[in-house]
Image: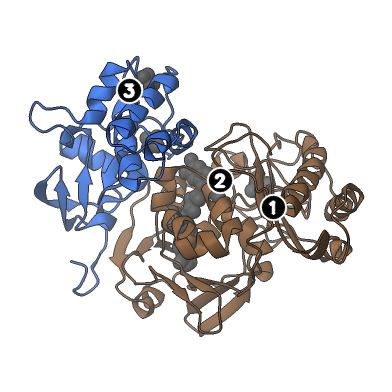
């Protein structure tokens, strides 16, 4: 791992360890496999979506050590040791994450394709703790496109969770 | 994506030792390199992962100013309290770029070395002197709405897409690099280059050299600055034209002016004569017009991007007004102040 000698293996799978939704996984991965493809094709976690595969839509957003990133642009081998959270890892048993519940309460989707990425992105936004107004939520959710145009309801859903956590500006003042 | 070997470097010397090959690439956040590899624009035979070499901190420099590690993420740089308070122009420019997810992954060294977004550069079915020297330029006489109006050459009319670099140019940053021949410093103005007849070189980094840090000088432009970015949608889009302004005011006179333009050339565009013309002058509309005139002297459209000349002129005036008034463009509320 990171504190031992550099690993250099030409054209071969490499051993890595990832904690995916709380489970430690020891994997053997070719260097050119992206985190998104690893999750979808090998770990059977198809919640994260491939919208563009180029960082342009946000549908593949997951949390890497609690921070939101586009999984289509990360090589899995470069994340050895990291903790990954996908949409499948947010609920606790049957209890939905407050963001999942809020998206349902506000009808914050139509086809649902962008939704896992939107919710993981919103989770990252909450972890960051910087967005406190509607304008800020809009700007900080702008890395997630929604072809169905559910944007206003998505902002409503995120605002509901911010409000319940006492994180909106009006409530804080 | 082509097949390649993968090495993880655990220190700067290790990275430099592994990174010397002409078709070896350093992997930082990957947000540009992996994208280009998926398009077969980049086909490295080896990647050297530099995410664990250190260089992940922001430090005070002994003589004043800040040192930004090359592997600090764009997000952590913009939100660092010292950067936000002392170099708000830089924080604003970073936050005007990409998306929160991308800024979490993108690093400072990667941002400096990101390649152009020219559509032909990305399309391996078309000629491009930057991608394949000597094949021609698809953008000249092609679709060139996003292309350069200043400093272009008959070989290439691409623009540098970075927002962060526009602020770094205005702030007179220095790029620190380490390579096979040791360490050196490159003034920001000399880091990126104009295309000339070698557009395959975006910058003056030599093969195998690693960017280790960006130094910010101990200067205070925090009271009068702005980063004004104009683009096709309000967020998550590259600049058509952007303007970074940093002013030092004495009363209602401008003591010192720095102006850098983004989206208009192969490198952040500065014109010393335009800045000197403002020094010692009142912050007036006539003086702002004069500065815009000097900045855009020699500007030439390519057809689809002709509109950029007028857009840049108005953006420069607006940005100077914002900076002089101490009302920087908000990166959240997108109404133009
Ligand atoms: C959809 C999308 C929208 C974007 N919008 C914007 C925008 O509006 N404004 C903007 O400014 N940017 C934008 N970006 C670009 C983004 O900022 C860059 O991709 C990012 O900064 C690159 O950093 P990285 O660490 O991911 O670099 P990587 O992709 O890892 O590397 C990029 C290049 O730099 C080299 N490199 C990396 N680190 C070093 C180093 N320390 N020394 C030497 N060479 C190095 C690599 O070898 C590679 O050639 C956007 C990107 C995407 C995908
Ligand atoms: S403008 Fe430059 S990058 Fe674009 S096609 Fe021409 S040579 Fe290539
Ligand atoms: S699939 Fe990753 S951003 Fe679109
Ligand atoms: S709900 Fe269909 S794309 Fe967002």
Q: Residue at x 36, y 66 (%)?
A: B50
Residue B87 seen by the camera: yes
Q: Residues within 10 Å of mark 2 (few under 14, many from 20)?
A: many
Q: Seen in the image, is A43 located left or right of residue B281?
A: left
What chain is the brown one? B
Task: Please tell me which of labels 2 and 1 falls first in the chain.
Answer: 2
Cα–Cα span, label 2 and label 3? 27 Å
Quarter occupied by residue B10: bottom left
Which residue position holds label 1?
B326
The answer to whether the residue bearing label 3 lies less than 8 angstroms from the nearest atom of ligand 4 is: yes
User: Mark 1 falls on what kind of element?
Assistant: loop
Cα–Cα span, label 3 and label 1? 43 Å
Foreground tag (2 vs 3): 2
Q: Residue at x 65, y 65 (%)?
A: B171
Of the pair A169 and B74, the residue shown nearer to us: A169
Foreground tag (2 vs 1): 1
Tell which residue pokes out farthest to the front in this image.
A173
Which residue position holds label 3?
A113
User: Mark 2 falls on what kind of element?
Assistant: loop
What chain is the blue one? A
Which residue position holds label 2?
B96
Chain to which the residue tagged by mark 3 belongs: A
Quarter occupied by residue B147: top right
Cα–Cα span, label 2 and label 1? 18 Å
The answer to whether the residue bearing label 2 lies less than 8 angstroms from the nearest atom of ligand 1 is: yes
- Looking at the rendered structure, whether the residues under marks 3 and 1 are on a common chain is answered as no
Give coordinates of residue B293: x percent, y percent: 89, 51
Give coordinates of residue A77: x percent, y percent: 25, 55
Circles 3, 1 touching at the beta carbon (< 8 Å): no
Give coordinates of residue B35: x percent, y percent: 44, 45
């Amino acid at each position: 791992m990171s504190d031992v000698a550099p690993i250099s293996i030409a054209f071969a799978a490499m051993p890595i360890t990832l904690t995916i939704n709380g489970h430690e996984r020891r994997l053997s991965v070719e260097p050119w496999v992206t985190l998104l493809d690893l999750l979808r094709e090998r770990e059977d976690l198809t919640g994260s979506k491939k919208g563009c595969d180029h960082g342009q839509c946000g549908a593949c957003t997951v949390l890497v050590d609690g921070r939101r990133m586009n999984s289509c642009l990360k090589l899995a081998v470069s994340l050895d040791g990291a903790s990954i959270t996908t949409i499948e890892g947010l609920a606790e048993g049957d209890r939905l994450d407050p963001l999942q519940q809020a998206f349902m309460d506000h009808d914050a989707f139509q086809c649902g394709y962008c939704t896992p990425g939107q919710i993981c992105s919103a989770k990252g936004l909450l972890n960051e703790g910087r967005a406190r107004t509607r304008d800020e939520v809009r700007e900080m959710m702008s890395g997630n496109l929604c072809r169905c145009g559910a944007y206003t309801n998505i902002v409503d859903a995120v605002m509901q969770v911010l409000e319940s956590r006492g994180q909106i500006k009006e409530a804080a003042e | 994506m082509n097949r390649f070997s993968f090495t993880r470097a655990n220190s700067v010397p290790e990275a430099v030792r592994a990174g010397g090959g002409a078709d070896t690439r350093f992997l930082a956040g990957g947000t540009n390199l992996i994208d280009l590899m998926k398009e077969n624009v980049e086909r490295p035979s080896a990647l050297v992962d530099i995410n664990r070499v250190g260089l992940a901190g922001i430090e005070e420099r002994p003589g004043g100013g800040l040192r930004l590690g090359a592997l600090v993420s764009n997000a952590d740089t913009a939100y660092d309290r010292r950067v936000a308070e002392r170099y708000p122009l830089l924080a604003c420019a970073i936050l005007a770029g990409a998306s929160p997810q991308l800024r979490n992954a993108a690093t400072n060294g990667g941002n400096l070395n990101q390649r152009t977004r020219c559509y032909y550069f990305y399309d391996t079915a078309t000629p491009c002197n930057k991608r394949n020297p000597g094949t021609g330029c698809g953008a000249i006489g092609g679709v060139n709405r996003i292309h350069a109006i200043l400093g272009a050459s008959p070989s290439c009319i691409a623009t540098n897409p970075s927002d962060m670099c526009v602020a770094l140019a205005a702030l007179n940053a220095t790029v620190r690099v380490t390579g096979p021949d040791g360490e050196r410093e490159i003034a920001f103005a000399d880091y990126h280059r104009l295309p000339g007849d070698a557009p395959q070189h975006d910058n003056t980094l030599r093969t195998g050299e690693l960017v280790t840090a960006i130094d910010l000088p101990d200067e205070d432009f925090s009271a009068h600055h702005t980063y004004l970015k104009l683009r096709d949608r309000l967020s998550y889009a590259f600049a058509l034209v952007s303007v970074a302004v940093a002013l030092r005011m004495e009363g209602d006179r401008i003591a010192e002016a720095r102006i850098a333009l983004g989206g208009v050339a192969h490198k952040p565009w500065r014109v010393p004569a335009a800045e000197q013309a403002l020094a010692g002058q009142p912050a007036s509309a006539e003086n702002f017009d004069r500065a815009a005139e000097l900045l855009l002297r020699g500007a030439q459209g390519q057809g689809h991007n002709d509109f950029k000349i007028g857009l840049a002129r108005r953006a420069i005036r607006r940005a100077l007004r914002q900076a002089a008034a101490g009302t920087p463009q908000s990166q959240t509320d997108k109404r133009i102040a």
